Image (spheres, helix red, strand yellow):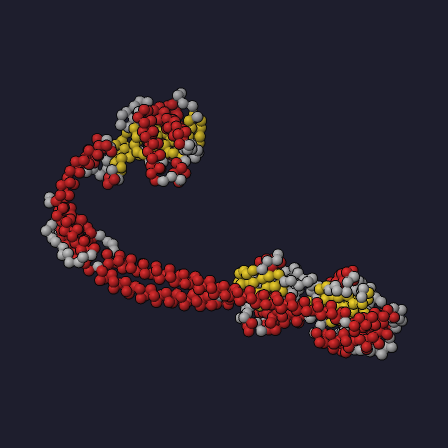
Amino acid sequence: MSGSGIDAVATNARSSRWRGGLSIQSKLLIMLLGVSLVSSVVVGAIGFINGRQSLQAAAIDQLTTIRELRADAIEREFQSLQTGVELDSRNASAVEGTKAFVDGFAALKDVEVTEEQAASVAAFYEDEFVPALEDRSQLEYVSSTFVPATAAGTYLQSFYTAGRAYDDYDAGLALSDAGDGSAWSAANATFGPYFQSLVETLNYEDVVLLDRDGNVVYSAYKSVDLGVDIHEEPYSDSSLAGAFDEVMLSGSLNKVVTTDFERYLPSLGLPTSWVVSPVGEGSDIIGAMAVQVPTDQINEVMTGDGNWSEQGLGETGEVYLVGRDDLMRSNSRQLLEDPDEYAQLAIEGGTAPSIAKRAAQVNGNVLLQPVNTFAVEEAQTGRSGITTGIGYLGSDSVTAYAPLEIDGLDWVIIARMDSSEAFAPVTDFTRNVLLSMLGILLVVSLLSLLLAQVFTRPVHRLVGAVRRVAEGDLDVQVPQGSRDEFGDLGSAFNDMASSLRIKQELIDEQKIENEKLLLTLMPESVAAKYRQGDEAITEAHENVSVVFAEMVGFDELAKGLSGEEEIGLLNTLMRGFDEAAEKSGVEKVRTLRGGYLASSGLVVPRVDNVRRSVEFARSLVDVLERFNAQNGTHISLRAGVDTGAVTSGLVARTTLAYDLWGDAVSLAYRVRSVTGEPGIYVSQAVRDRTQELVTYVEAGTVEAQGKTETVWKVA
């Protein structure tokens, strides 16, 4: 082996010892760790995702089940209530009692109301009812508005309503005979206990009987609506009046109408719902029975009688009802458990402070608390489902929603729970999975370290032998004890040492071939300087024209092609460009994947180099047009032309890249994209020298060498 070959090997070996990087042992350790860790992570991730999804699904299923159970319960509650009212209204006692009260009320049509009786009724409203109503509603009312318009109504209220505290409901319910000797009092003594038993047994808020004209001829509590005409103010717009008219117009004793909640004035403006059914025999309707829905029973159903936690709703879950007006129809759990905390959370959730504080004050949010959430909107369109988002109390919640099927009511049911509580098992599971994964990763890391050390011992022996070769000892031999890949590597190493001399001879022959190839890459003058070892090889040239051509659309064409197809088309285009350069007397400098750099007057000085450059650019357009016609493509050209001084030379000595640069090259590059549209663009200098031969249009300006340069486009 020649001395130069040995020196080269030695130099490379020393360089390898000094070069920074990872050892084989380190790389092997990394690979073992990588494969093991990735496998562990993948398996853990699959288990984690499946487990997390299962836990989330379980939480969602639980909330959905609770919603369905509560929906079924409230629907059965109303169905039972509606059926009960229908049956009660057709009961013989109810029919006979209604007849008696209707007749008794009619007998009082022309009764004489004394001044004392009228004064007692007026005083009741002035001193008892209206102050209580105003305190409850925070509104002002005129007491005379509530005094019955009929003599019969005033007469009955003077005996049964006035003279007692308004909120003494038990006293009103117990009144049976005022001793006035009227037929109405006789009917109350006879049939009143039956209707009172309905209130006490079935927990109705009130039972009201009406005649065919809409007069309230009986009230179990003998309240302020006793004896009033519901078609007169302030009851004419009430849902009770609407429901009464609907059942009377139906003409059927089987008709039952249920009303939504409204603020009923005789109940101090409390939310009130009614179930109304006609009373009569056969086809003869004599009046109607209206039962005030027990709101406490609705709240008991929706709150599970206050046993939220025992029924799977945890610490934050609840089920509530919402009407078409987006207001609650049952009480909030937070309100019942902590009114002050409820008010603060509701305000933070977007509820008006006055509404939140009012709900906390009266300890009820029916017809007060708005719920403008996605779940409510979806349920009101008839859809059921599950969603997550911010609830009416401002917390992130998991919500199950559905419409209710209650005759006469357009309500939806919402079951919600704070996301943090609903998905708490998911959080615990995530923590356990992560801790388990960390333990597995630690064990895998220690095992990989041990295996890497055992595996790399033969490699260290080979490294020692390579260093001896680097020092010039070509007689070194590596023991080939093992019969695995390391044994094969040792045999290959021994063959390498024997063949180094032959390879060095081949290298010398290749140098001769490289000299020949060098002259094909650059001019002789540049090649000579390169062989001398010059680091900066440049030549200055004056009066040179530069063409910088760029293909537009080739990248889009290449996206749908394979690598071989792309190279084939590109070679076809470049051959066409080379032929055009040769015909125009232009020298190719270098080609790009999507462009072409050429000059005129660089190697061979030419007086008409500017004209030749412009003609060459125009011939490139012809080449592309022929190519497009043959291949059905749409490639266009964007070329820039300038003239002036340039510098040529060898750029990046290690890669033998011969290039051209200078102001003329830079300006040719810049003018080509002045508009972004295809075309041939030239500088002012080119235009001045060829304007008699070529027609130009002004295309714009560019900044060059501190001044504004006008750019012209070949028309």
Nearer the observer, 600 or 703 = 600
- Labels in figure, total: 0
- Residue drawn 83% across and 70% down? 99
Nearer the observer, 178 or 33 = 33
Residue 616 image position (x, y, % from top left): 35, 26
Name the quarter where the C terminus is drawn. Answer: top left
Name the quarter where the N terminus is drawn. Answer: top left
Q: Is residue 162 visible?
A: no
Q: Is residue 705 above or below residue 389?
A: above
Q: Is residue 641 above or below residue 446?
A: above
Residue 344 image position (x, y, % from top left): 58, 67
**In-image side of 240 versus 569 (left or right):** right
- Residue drawn 20% across and 56% down? 484
The residue positioned farthest toward the top in the image shown: 692
The residue positioned farthest toward the front in the image shown: 282
Residue 265 image position (x, y, % from top left): 74, 67
- Residue drawn 32% across and 22% down? 608
**In-image side of 514 versus 176 (left or right):** left
Q: Quadrant of residue 48?
A: bottom left
- Residue drawn 19% across and 33% down? 516
Q: Quadrant of residue 393?
A: bottom right
Residue 398 image position (x, y, % from top left): 53, 63
**In-image side of 236 versus 672 (left or right):** right
Q: Is residue 698 visible?
A: yes
Q: Quadrant of residue 617?
A: top left
